[in-house]
Image (cartoon, rainbow, N blue to C red):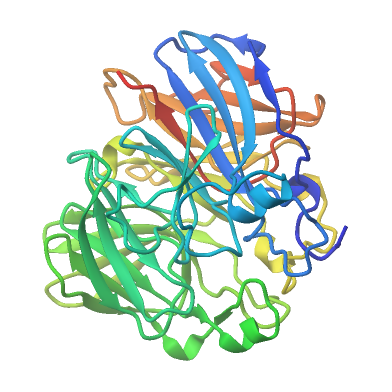
Amino acid sequence: MNPNNGFQGAYTPVTEEVTSFDLPVTGTIPAELNGRYLRNGPNPMDLDEPRLHLFTGNGMVHGVRLREGKAEWYRNRWVRSAPVAEALGEQPRPGAFVRRDAGPNTHVIGHANRTLALIEGGSRPYELTYDLDTVGACDFDGTLRDGFVAHPKLDPATGELHAVTYAIGGDTLTYLVVSPLGKVVRSVPVPAPHAPLMHDFALTRKYAVLYDLPVTFSQAAADSGNAFPMNWNETRGGRIGLLPRSGTEVRWFDVNPCFVFHTLNAYDQGDTVVVDVVRYPKMFVGADLKGNSLPTLDRWVINTVTGKVTETRLDDHPQEFPVVSPAVVTGAYRYGYSAVTLDLIRYMGPAGNLDGLPVDAFTDSLIKHDLDRQTATVRSFGTGHYTSEAYFVPAQNARTEDDGYVLAYVFDPERGATDLVILSGQDFTGAPIATVHLPVRVPLGFHGSWVPDPA
């Protein structure tokens, strides 16, 4: 195994696809949770691949199906991109993926009765069956011209799926709107001459909020064989763009140089736009990345009258993978959830090497943010455990914004396997409502969703 590819410790891939039924449960699964908790992440098949990077490994989706208070199954499946299908001796799945070098390993969502594994950088989603087998590349019934994105936003009021896409090294972004029926109904090109890495964006009821920040594509890094050829380019400065959801012209606002992987939420407030993000003052700095910064939860308030952007620190904990209740996306809100992190990127060399970082240095904690009270409650699962992104599922007939369930995969070192832990949103540090004991370990990965069964 190549020791310089990042897939060590908690990121060590699993080597088998598993199907397990009637999972053991401690506690009581709420009967209203009928659906699947899905999570995607890199799980490379060939750890000796010289260009392998933590961000580019073959995608694997892990899922647990809950129904009527039972955990009916756990499955993990590699997404059958062309290289994976070839490695497994299978026929390639239909549809053009656009890029061959990386499979959809970043996110998995449900939309328009489809399950979609996502990646960014100019590639299309891959559609999966309910049981996580691969159907093929998805072009939304012929309406998606090029690639899609890792972080679309679902508007809870309209049922539309919004996305801002880019191609690695390209000079244009594209704002897309996918209807509740699963067809692209709006496509707006946006010039992006600096070829920025824009992993995420924000959505309000008026605007798509774009991040044109100084992490940009480097042709020199690509030519040298870097599997993730993005560099810090501080001379570029930083700016945020407001694109009206019904318009075509972006208005840009200058901000201090920084980088954003992920948005917590955003909303309109009179003549201002509030954008809450996990913000890095610097990212991908230098060949050894030792100039990178710790991420914090910050707020931008954009005054559309004066053109001024005010920057405020919301929470100092190093953190990532921020989420809110899907019911409050685009609107004013009170609560958010994120994972406590170490400065993981700082440990990574150019190939993604973790330099021997031990498993117990990974996060074992989640955070619940109360932005009205300006408090952050940390929930630790204990030394040796690790977790990353959680997902909030509102309760049926929820009376408050945090009336619901926080779902997360948590590795249990005593079992050497992973649990699906279900916490109360209102009793965040209390005993879990239920713990579903999976038969295997789920490596640390990236993003996922709760996909409810059709009503």
Q: Nearer the viewer, residue 318 or 47?
A: 47
Q: Is residue 136 visible?
A: yes
Residue 69's x, y, as percent? 49, 9
Using the rendered image of the protein, determine whether residue 381 is visible from the camera's viewpoint: no
Question: Residue at image x 16%, y 60%?
Answer: 245
Quadrant showing the C terminus: top left
Residue under the image location 66 percent in, 64 percent down = 345
Q: Position of residue 442 (x, y in %)?
A: 69, 36
**Residue under the point 57% across and 14% down:** 71
Residue 12 position, x and y percent, is 78, 47
Q: Residue at x 78, y 61 (%)?
A: 354
User: Which residue of the protein is positioned furthest toward the front in this rendering?
Assistant: 91
User: Which quadrant of the view contains residue 189?
Assistant: bottom left
Left or right side of 349 for 40: left
Q: Nearer the viewer, residue 35 or 369?
A: 35
**Left or right placement of residue 3 versus residue 145 in this view:** right
| Place of residue 64 in the rendered image (x, y in percent of width and height, measured from the top left) | 56, 25
Q: Is residue 341 above or below residue 38?
A: below
Question: Is 35 located above or below residue 158 in the figure?
Answer: above
Is 124 rendered above or below residue 233?
above
The quarter of the rendered structure image containing the N terminus is bottom right
Image: 271 above or below 453: below
Q: Quadrant of residue 379?
A: top right
Q: Which of the pair 102/384 is nearer the observer?
A: 102
**84 with respect to 366 (left or right):** right
**Marker count (numbered):** 0
